Amino acid sequence: MIHTVRYWKVCNANFFKLKRGEFIIHWRSDGTIDTVKTVQQLVLDESINIRKRFEIACKYGLERNIRILWAEMQPSDQTENFDTAYNYLEQFWVRWMRHGSRVPWMQEASEYFKHARGYFSTGFTRFNWFFSYLQPGDRQKFLKEMEFAEDDDLRLCLHAMTKEEEEKILKANVALVLLNCLRWPLQNLFLETVQKTWKYIDESKFKVVLFHILDSKDSLRDFDYCELLEIFWNRSPSHLKESTKEDPHLRVDIDSCLDEMRRKREAGDKSIDLCLDEIRRKRENDLCLDEKRRKNESFNNERLYYEQKVNYDTKRKRKAIRKNRGWHSKKQKKN
């Protein structure tokens, strides 16, 4: 989660030069940052410079906020001095507002981004708000640019893509998609995604993914990356495994991770054996107790039977004695 916050700050807070305390992060239930809510709060916060808020709204394509902030800046002529040479999203919105926003922005975006190329390598761009409005031919230009997309932005764009577009982005940037799945909370989707994309993974991309898993293992504590690497390694084709021999340092790190998993498994097996022994001893003790209980019950039953028999015999003898006394007494009276 700490890594998620740091990543968001790099992509947003640091870029916009936001000070600590100028933003509150909103979270989704799955442990990811709710970017839309977080950003919407930023652009409504009047304690933040209005020019900065406008820039944020442009990045995220918040049309309503862009209109409101533009109207607020107009009386002070702040709308006249925009240096948008290196910010093509802001350049688009400024041009659209200056033209009176007569044409729907979706139509304007389709025309504007038709001629855009190589403008989005700054890490500043959010693609998803305009990507789905582009014509298929125009969208093709942005597939390569997706390597600069933020994690949640890439996922939203992938949802909007056709099957053919997905195939193209996987062919060009399969490592990017896989690395995205290594970030919280998508790690459980990583192996499933790998299984569908082996045909796009060459030796260089394979090593990139391995390096990233190993780096995550050393720097993050949000997932068992060592176990993930072991499963990924065991499922990997032989020719990709062989290619790692060319990089001795990588191979040492991989073997170290695999050894660690073996040690964990052995320790786990010992723990299981100890648990099983404990269970067996408990069962044996329980059996002994049951046997003892049965013997006690048998003894008690026998004692009860004996006591009842003695009582019965005693009563019968007493009755016979009383009867005999009565007979003698009658005989004496007759005499």
Image (cartoon, rainbow, N blue to C red):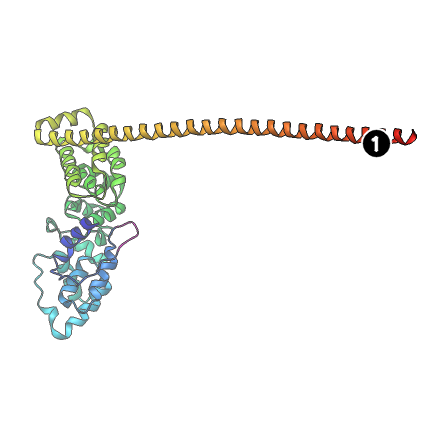
* Crowding near the residue tagged with mark 1, few <14, some 14–19, many ≥20 C-alpha atoms within 10 Å: few
Please state which of residues 163 and 32 is positioned toward the viewer in this rendering.
32
The picture places residue 100, in percent across and down from the top left corner, at 19, 67
The range drawn in magenta is 27-31
Tell which residue pokes out farthest to the front in this image.
335
| Residue 31 located left or right of residue 9 | right
Nearest the eye: 141 or 54: 54
The residue furthest bottom is 75
Q: What element carries label 1?
A: helix
Dividing the picture into quadrants, the one containing residue 288 is: top left
**Residue at the limit of the structure toward the right, as seen here:** 334
Name the residue: 27% across, 39% down: 189
Residue 213 placement: quadrant: top left
Q: Position of residue 93 (x, y in %)?
A: 16, 61
> In the image, is residue 65 part of the stretch drawn in magenta?
no
Residue at image position (88%, 28%) is 331
On the rendered structure, is 26 left or right of 304?
A: left
Secondary structure mostly seen in magenta is loop
Note whether residue 247 is visible: no
Q: In this view, does 197 lie above or below 18?
A: above
Q: Which of 333 and 163 is in front in this view?
A: 333
Q: How many marks?
A: 1
Residue 283 vs residue 254, the one in the foreground:
283
Query: In x, y percent, where is residue 128?
Result: 22, 51
- Where is the C terminus found, in terms of image quarters? top right
Q: At which x and y percent is residue 131?
A: 22, 51
The answer to whether any part of residue 181 appears in the image is yes
- For disc 1, the marked residue is 326
Residue in the picture at 29% in, 49% down: 30
56 sits left or right of 325 in the view: left
| Three-letter code, disc 1 | Gly
